[in-house]
């Protein structure tokens, strides 16, 4: 193993241990939150709504809740880690180390994407307590899981570099990401929309994520899954490139 690889491994290990060592703050809240979601939206409302596109309502909303939990945690982990490092000035140790900018970005993004992926898996486990999951296309499910968590880990890096205080991180997560998810077809079918509302929904990137995960889990999607995967992959590449440029400039760190 090369020196650079060992340095990257050390950075990823540090970032992973940071959230693994605090399971009550990292893993327990999304588990409790999703038990409540499944109980209210899946069991109570689901029994009244019936089925959507030949699946039960609780099965229909499950992929969206998985996406919400996964991307929120991927974004939160990266943004908090970067900003906390800036706030306490220990991120300079990473920047001034022999680790290249690309490896630095990879370390923060991979650790944060891993957290999001784990949370998504835990939410699927909670879903098993309430309904059956056929896993129609597991390869697509994993692919969308990897792409979406990586994308939002990269966005979290940008958020962490731009944030001026901890309140900014809360605003980004709670008032930007979550509304996009809720208007991304989590609790309703796009077929229920028409005209401008339907067209506007197609501009929401969450629609592609939710439908992609839904296709992997249930075998149904209102958007071609290959199109969704290409769009999200392209967006991920762009975001990671921006991450690299910001680190090379020292944006938010040396400015």
Image: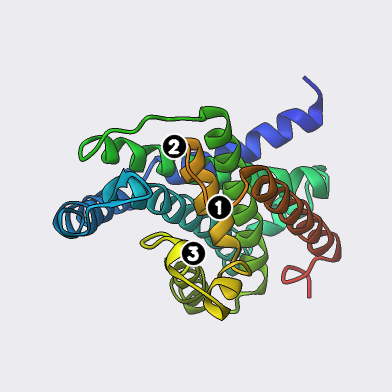
- How far from the left and from the top, in percent, is residue 100? 83, 45
17 to the left or right of 230 = left
Q: Tag on residue 250?
A: none
Which residue does the image show at 36% across and 61% down from the upper left? 187
Mark 2 closeness class: few <14, some 14–19, many ≥20 residues within 10 Å: many
Which residue does the image show at 77% across and 42% down from the upper left? 103
Residue 128, image quadrant = top left
Can you say which quadrant of the picture contains the N terminus? top right
Q: Is residue 87 above or below residue 68?
A: below
Q: Nearer the viewer, residue 238 or 53?
A: 53
Disc 3 from disc 1: Cα separation: 8 Å
- How far from the left and from the top, in percent, is residue 232? 68, 52
Q: Which residue is mark 3?
A: 184
Q: Which residue is mark 1?
A: 209
Q: Nearer the viewer, residue 2 or 134?
A: 134
131 to the left or right of 254 = left
Which residue does the image show at 79% across and 64% down from the upper left? 246
Can you say which quadrant of the picture contains the C terminus? bottom right
- The numbered mark, 2 or 3, whose residue comes first in the sequence reads 3
In contact (CB < 8 Å): disc 3 and disc 1:
yes
């Amino acid at each position: 193993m090369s020196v650079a690889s060992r340095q990257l491994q050390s950075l990823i290990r540090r970032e992973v241990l940071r959230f693994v060592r605090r399971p009550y703050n990292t893993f327990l809240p999304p588990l409790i939150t999703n038990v409540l979601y499944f109980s209210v939206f899946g069991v109570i409302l689901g029994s009244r709504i019936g089925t959507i596109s030949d699946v039960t309502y609780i099965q229909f909303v499950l992929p969206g809740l998985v996406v919400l939990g996964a991307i929120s945690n991927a974004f939160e982990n990266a943004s908090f880690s970067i900003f906390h490092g800036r706030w306490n000035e220990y991120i300079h140790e990473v920047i001034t180390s022999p680790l290249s900018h690309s490896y630095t970005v990879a370390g923060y993004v991979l650790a944060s994407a891993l957290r999001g992926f784990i949370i998504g898996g835990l939410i699927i486990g909670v879903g098993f307590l309430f309904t059956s999951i056929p896993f129609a296309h597991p390869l697509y499910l994993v692919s969308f899981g990897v792409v979406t968590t990586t994308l939002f880990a990269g966005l979290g890096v940008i958020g962490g570099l731009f944030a001026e205080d901890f309140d900014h991180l809360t605003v980004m997560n709670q008032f930007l990401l979550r509304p996009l998810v809720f208007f991304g077809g989590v609790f309703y079918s796009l077929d229920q929309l028409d005209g401008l509302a339907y067209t506007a929904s197609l501009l929401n990137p969450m629609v592609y994520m939710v439908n992609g995960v839904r296709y992997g889990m249930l075998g149904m999607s209102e958007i071609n899954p290959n199109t969704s995967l290409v769009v999200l992959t392209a967006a991920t590449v762009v975001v990671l490139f921006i991450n690299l440029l910001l680190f090379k400039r020292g944006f938010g760190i040396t400015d």
